[in-house]
Amino acid sequence: MTIQIKVGVVGPLWIQESLQRCFDLFPSLSPIFRLSDCLSDASEITRELSSQVDCLLYSGRVPYLVAKESIPDHLSAFYIPLKGAGLYRALYLLKGRKEMSHISFDGIQIPFIDSVKKSLSESFTYTVFEEPVLPNSFECIVHFHKEVHKVKEHCVAVTSLKIVHEQLKKEGITSEWLIPTEEDMIVILERLLLATTQRKHKEMQIVFGRIYIDDTSFMKDFKTEKQLQTRNHKIYSMLFDFVEQFDGFLTSLHEHEYLFVTNRGAFERITEGYKSLPILDEAKKGLDIRLSIGIGFGETAFQAGGNARTAVFQAKNFGGNCGFIVREDREVFGPLELDAPIKYPLSVTDQKLIEKAADIGTSAVYLEKTLSMLKRKKDNKFSAQEVAEILGITNRSAHRILQSWLDGKIIEVIGTEKMTTRGRPRQVFAIKE
């Protein structure tokens, strides 16, 4: 099924016929024209189109700059650049009207001028307006062309702004308005199609989220099973409302960890581009619980799920009550909700350990929790009893897990603890480098 991309087109009235012919070459692009010959309308038109389209296309750099502050962060915006093809047309029209030995230019780069001049074997000299062509530079550009015209014989002007072209005509200066050709339009539509299609595919990318309750000691406060179940139901309801915002699916992995699935586009919109994760504050204030949230992006469910597991490990390791993202390129982003979240490559060591756990058939979750414990205490040494306490399992189960880690060469025995009471010395383990 072909992805239909709605393109909001902002520019002057004259461009519709030419641009429509170019759009006809791209069946997956559906233009929505909102045109006006008044440049200042670009901002209002942009705001009007923003909720209706997948991207925006401006007729040139100046209308793009006029509207720039009104373009939402989630929308890609493009403008048709002025290149050599438009200059061929301008020179052709000028040569039929007046002898020219010098040309004053604005809005086009020198390499394009030199390329066209060489291609046509022209001998004219030229002067270029060196400042950027901005919406408020109209008077400066007119003054520039007039000054060049005063000192250069057989001088004509080529301008990128219609309003400058009209003013120069009033001043009696021969000029031509430099407009993009259909070739220029086709080039930008090809770029727009590629970028927006890639963005749409990325928006449909699967997202897995792991939500971990950092402290489950509150469970000890409930005297009956009914009280505990009521509390768990409140937690589930709060998390369900959060996930429902982006049409996600929520399931409970066990009494203190949940999993949700959604797509990237929905997640980005609800979190305002990863700037807002209000569930953290809601959970803390409403139910007095702290959450560690890990978000995994991926091209496949397997990749996204693995990245979510790693992301929640990063959140817990940061101290909890925060959210982290691990993207498909293995870059970590977080903690969310900070004014300036950091980005960094995923720790190779930790990830290799997690993958190693999967290879030997032991729980990666257990390994993550143990690693988190070690980082918090800033000591690589631990005992079976410490593992049992952090995992909430019996000493016998902890010994069985540690034996599998020994067999898989994830950990090693580095000594024994001195006992203050009678009993067998306890082994001390460490994660292998």
Image: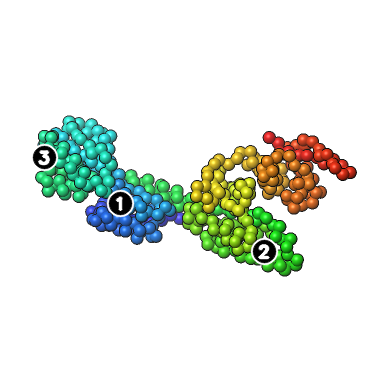
Give the labeled residue for mark 2: 232
Classify mark 3: residues with Cα within 10 Å, few (<14), some (14-19) or many (20+): few
User: Mark 1 near mark 3, Cβ–Cβ under 8 Å?
Assistant: no
Q: Which mark is residue 98?
A: 3
Say what secondary structure mark 2 lies in.
Answer: helix
Q: Could you tell which of marks 1 and 3 lies nearer the N-terminus?
A: 1
Residue at point 19% right, 34% down? Answer: 126
Say what secondary structure mark 3 lies in.
Answer: loop
Which percent across, then down, holds residue 183? 29, 44
Q: Quadrant of the N terminus?
A: bottom left
Q: Which amino acid, mark 1? A: Val
Which percent across, then down, holds residue 234? 64, 65
Which percent across, then down, holds residue 181? 26, 46
Q: Is residue 78 above or below residue 120?
A: below
Residue at point 80% right, 49% down? Answer: 395
Left or right for 234, reference 46: right
User: Mark 2 near mark 1, Cβ–Cβ under 8 Å?
Assistant: no
Q: Which of these two is toward me, 136 or 243? A: 136
Q: Is residue 14 visible?
A: yes
Q: Quadrant of residue 370?
A: top right
The mark tally for this picture is 3
Q: Which mark is residue 34?
A: none
Q: Which mark is residue 66?
A: 1
Q: Could you tell which of marks 2 and 3 lies nearer the N-terminus?
A: 3
State how far apart marks 2 and 3 are (Cα): 84 Å
Q: Which dot, 1 or 3, sits closer to the camera?
A: 1
Left or right for 38, reference 430: left
Left or right for 253, reference 121: right
Q: Which amino acid, mark 2? A: Asn
Say what secondary structure mark 1 lies in.
Answer: helix
Q: Which amino acid, mark 3? A: Lys
